[in-house]
Structures are given as C-alpha cells and as structure tokens.
Image: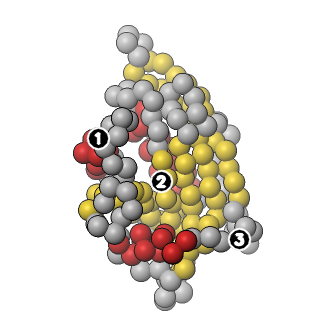
Amino acid sequence: MEKDLKIDKEYKIEYKGWFLKKYFNFIPIIVDLRNSPQNDPDDYLIKKLKIFGVPVDRAESCYSFTFRKSGFIGPSHFNIYNCFFPDSRIIKVMEIMDIHVLRKNKGIGTKILTIINKIAIENGVSLIVGELEKDSKDGSLEKRKNFFMKNGYIAKNDKRAKFSGWMVKKFLDNF
C-alpha cells in the first residue's frame, strides 16, 4: 500500500523587500487520485515522458496539489504519477502544471521550486517535468527557460510539445 503524500500543512517564504526581508505564507490543497478513474487523453503524459527519454508503458495519477493564491503567488499546480517501465520498474514523476508568481524578481519562484524539490524527494519522486508556456503578459519564454535552467533543470525544444515547444526536466538523486 502506497503511503500518503508527505507535504507540510503550510509553507512560509521569505522574499526581498525594499529594506527588510519579508515573509508570506501559503497553504497547499491536496487531492488524492489513487482510487480515481485514470484519464490521460491520447497518453499525453507517456508521450511527454518519451520526449525526455523516459520510455514508460503506463502512467497512473497519484496526487494533485495546488498552492492557493495569495498576494504573492497565483494558483500553482503540480501532479505526481506512478510510471511503469517495460522492465517492471516503477518510478514517480512530478509534473509542474503551472507556477504563477505575481511579484517577480524577489526570489519567490526559486523558493517555490526549492519547496517542490523537497516535496518530490520526500515522496520518492525521481523526475520532475514541465512544459513551458509561450510568451505572455506574465513573461517571456526565454525568461522561463533561463529560470528553470538556473535552478538545475534541462530545457529541451521538441515540436511534439503542446504549448511553446519547450519542456524542462530535472532528474533527482534517486533516478
């Protein structure tokens, strides 16, 4: 039997203020998907993992969690999956669906990624993946790529990606 998701009830982020360090808190909302009907239209997650060189046969949703909107972050969404390899290995993969930082250039996005990495490691996740959005009012694709690469992710351009053509991945120590 798989254990419940290890996640804190609340997170506190310190950010750069004008003169002093400031803080804000946010609360994750967790949805347990282990006993839900599995729905991956067109096996998109499997196709996405194969783009990154992870040849899985099947993927099952385990959890979805969201960091609630605050004055500093918009809703940020993440999913964790069990992924089954042809050789019977099973790994956990976390997909970053959206990280929405409302106040840029204060270190908040980097600290959210640090929290995501901690959650991933504590829950046995081996790989974190995400697809980057095209240029928008929230920022340019180039800035998004640089942000993830600065935080240890590998960026890959692939025409099979749905949005911008760019995807990111990060292998954790337990891969």
Q: CA distance from mark 3 to mark 1?
A: 36 Å
Q: Is residue 159 left or right of residue 133?
A: left
**The residue tagged with tag 3: helix, strand or loop?**
loop
Quadrant holding the N terminus:
bottom right
In the rendered image, is residue 118 in sight?
no
When the figure is inspected, residue 106 is found, relative to residue 163, above or below; the finding is: above
- Give amino acid for label 1: Ser
In the rendered image, is residue 66 in sight?
yes
Q: CA distance from mark 2 to mark 1?
A: 18 Å
When the figure is inspected, residue 155 is found, relative to residue 85, above or below; the finding is: above
Residue holding disc 2: 96
Percent position of residue 72, x then y: 50, 27
- Give amino acid for label 2: Ile
When the figure is inspected, residue 22 is found, relative to residue 81, above or below; the finding is: above
Q: Mark 2 and mark 3 in contact (Cβ < 8 Å)? A: no
The mark nearer the N terminus, 2 or 1, is 2
Residue holding disc 1: 140
Query: Residue at the location (26% across, 62% down)?
Result: 157
**The residue tagged with tag 1: helix, strand or loop?**
loop
The quarter of the displayed image where residue 144 is located: top left
Residue holding disc 3: 37
Q: Is residue 26 left or right of residue 43?
A: right
Q: CA distance from mark 3 to mark 2?
A: 21 Å
Q: Nearer the viewer, mark 2 or mark 1?
A: 1
- Give amino acid for label 3: Pro
Query: Residue at the location (45% across, 34% down)?
Result: 101
